[in-house]
Amino acid sequence: MKKTCVELFAGVGGFRCGLNKVSLEGEKVTENGNWEFLWANQWEPSTKTQDAYNCYGTRFGFEDVSNVDIFEVDKKQVPDHTLLVGGFPCQDYSVAQTLSNSKGIEGKKGVLWWAIEETLAIKQPPFVLLENVDRLLLSPAKQRGRDFGIILRSFYENGYDVQWRVINAGEYGLPQKRRRTYIFAYHKSTNYYKEMQKLNDNDVIFEKGLFVKQFPIKESYEAIAEACVSDYKDIIEVSNMFKCEFYNAGVMKNGGIYTVKTKADFNLVYPLRKIREENEVDEKFFLTDTQVEKFAFLKGSKRIPRVKPDGTPYYYTEGAMPFPDNLDAPARTMLTSEGGVSRTTHVIEDFKTKKPRLLTPVECERINGFPDNWTNTGMTQKKRNFMMGNALVVGVIEKIGEEIENIIDKEN
């Protein structure tokens, strides 16, 4: 089985950088891995300037990357591939029957999961690796687990079993405390599917599944839940009725769900100080006295009196955050607002001057594991920060990719 890949919602290429252990020297990109990327799609509907697409194309070439709405893509024209990857947005996945066709399913307009589902149905790739925010497992608040249940039912209907883990990259020796849900699906036609079918669910999670080999967990668990998406008549019934308390590790086999709450078992810490630029940094990144005062307030503890819409008084409280950021711990989760004057923006002590300053774009890239200057492709500094706030941690994908390669080698 060839190691071929198709990438949806490609962004600036995090999956490709991780799977192929990409390096950048000057403008020369070297892919050090074994994956052949056949096709990618990246389209941002809310902006005329397609910065992520331009970055991806500049680094990897524009020939095989599409810049159109994924819903306009004829999935039959997508190349056959071994692995489908994508970091899709967390949205409301509720579905309803169409008025014109009682058997039809209509997702909310623009919900991007259905582009993935359509690709699964038409192309039937042997393996799938997806990334999403950790709250995917909990949404929506009024029907916990429904959205993830719909996704699992979609996989089930298309002939897949699934493993998932919520991984905090900072707990596994990587530079950022970024929690994300990783979903690995494998088709019933694969040897791996048959191998996993023989194991009990506990062994898949704790000993022999995909994630535990690179991201070890403690043997004990704090909570457990079971459910079954195959018990429902169709995906519409799942949307209307399904509830489940999904935890940070789990497996679905034949529609049956087994999920447990686990803790990481790893000791290596990647300190923030290791990503600092040691050369002289542009003066624009340093805080003024006024900004120092503003950040000190934003990051300090608060107890502010407020009033609810019904007139009830209450206190809004926030705990204190380190200011400047702790250089001996991994970076906090980077948001798309990184670099603005806000509570979540990182402020670090400069290597040379010891003065407080903001992160540079290169440091933001390092926190996510991208090569230095990866996003230096014509974007503004603000947009480069935004891209890293949207990106995944490359090192997580690299580790997962190594295990997927081992699986594919056994398919042969």
Image: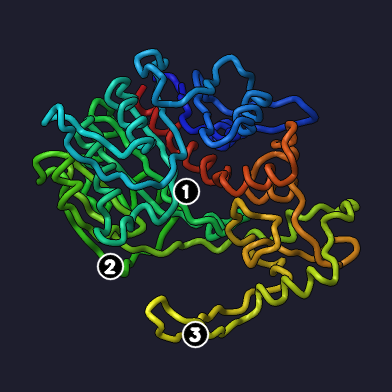
Residue 271 position by quadrant: bottom right
Q: Tag 3: residue type?
A: Tyr
Q: Tag 1: residue type?
A: Gln
Residue 114 as seen in the image, left or right of residue 301: left
Q: Mark 2: which secondary structure? A: strand
Distance of label 3 from label 1 (alpha carbons): 44 Å
Where residue 315 is drawn, which disc sits there? 3
Distance of label 1 from label 2 (alpha carbons): 22 Å
From the image, which quarter does the N terminus lie in?
top left
The answer, for residue 187, to whether it is visible in the render is yes
* Residue that label 2 marks: 223
The answer, for residue 36, to whether it is visible in the render is no
Which marked residue is nearer to the observer: mark 2 or mark 3?
3
Q: Residue at x 41, y 37 (%)?
A: 129
Q: Residue at x 41, y 47 (%)?
A: 90
* Residue that label 1 marks: 214
Residue 14 as seen in the image, left or right of residue 75: right
Residue 142 x, y percent position in the rendering:
26, 61
Q: Nearer the viewer, residue 12 or 220?
A: 12
